[in-house]
Amino acid sequence: MIKDLFIHPFKQRTVAYYLGLGAAALAVIGAIVYAITDFGDKSFSATAFVVMLVGGLAYAGVMFTEFEFMTLIPSAMYVLGFAFALNAMLPPLSDVWNGVSFIGGNAFVGLAFTIVFAVAAILGIVTAFMELGRKKA
């Protein structure tokens, strides 16, 4: 049975499995692009980058194990990454809101990646409550 998971990890999987895979891909790609677009300003959080990258890569544990609660680990990482990105985005956003340039930073980039990380977190949470295993034949 475990051998089948390594040979055919995508065979007869449910929709939730692919939603989780999409969330993992979004987290990894989003984290990499987030690091690339770091302009050294105050809208970037290195912690959000690391947590989202680890969360996306942790989905491999879901792919190759049948542990029922394994989806909680990537989902928790996505939520933490979203929280850290939101925390880093708020000071530049307050500058935009108040019409001043006191703190600095790119509020648009921070807001865009906060939304990307929020989508990954929502997909991860939805996946955690759905059946991930193989379809019943």
Image (cartoon, rainbow, N blue to C red):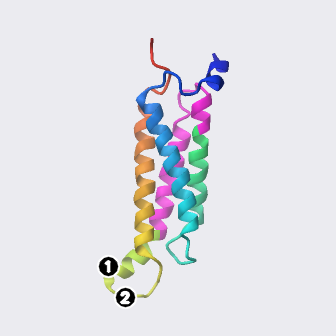
Percent from the top left, x then y, of residue 114?
43, 61
Q: Is residue 76 above or below residue 135?
A: below
Q: Is residue 37 above or below residue 126?
A: below
Badge 2 marks a residue whose secondary structure is: loop
Percent from the top left, x then y, of residue 16?
43, 32
Q: Which residues are magenta?
A: 60-88
Residue at coordinates 57% horizontally, 47% vertically from top-left? 55
How many residues crowd mark 2 within 10 Å: few (<14), some (14–19), many (20+)?
few
Mark carried by residue 100: 2
Percent from the top left, x then y, of residue 15?
41, 30
Is 19 or 11 nearer to us in this picture? 11
Badge 1 marks a residue whose secondary structure is: helix
Q: Farthest residue toward the top? A: 137
Q: Is residue 96 found inside the magenta-colored segment of the image? A: no
Q: Is residue 34 above or below residue 27?
A: below
Residue at coordinates 61% horizontally, 37% vertically from top-left? 60
Query: Split into 4 quadrants, where in the image is the N terminus?
Result: top right
Q: Farthest residue toward the right? A: 3
Residue beneath label 1, please?
A: 97
Q: Is residue 68 found inside the magenta-colored segment of the image? A: yes
- Tag 1: amino acid: Trp
Residue at coordinates 58% horizontally, 65% vertically from top-left? 35
Is 7 or 59 nearer to us in this picture? 7
Percent from the top left, x then y, of residue 48?
55, 60
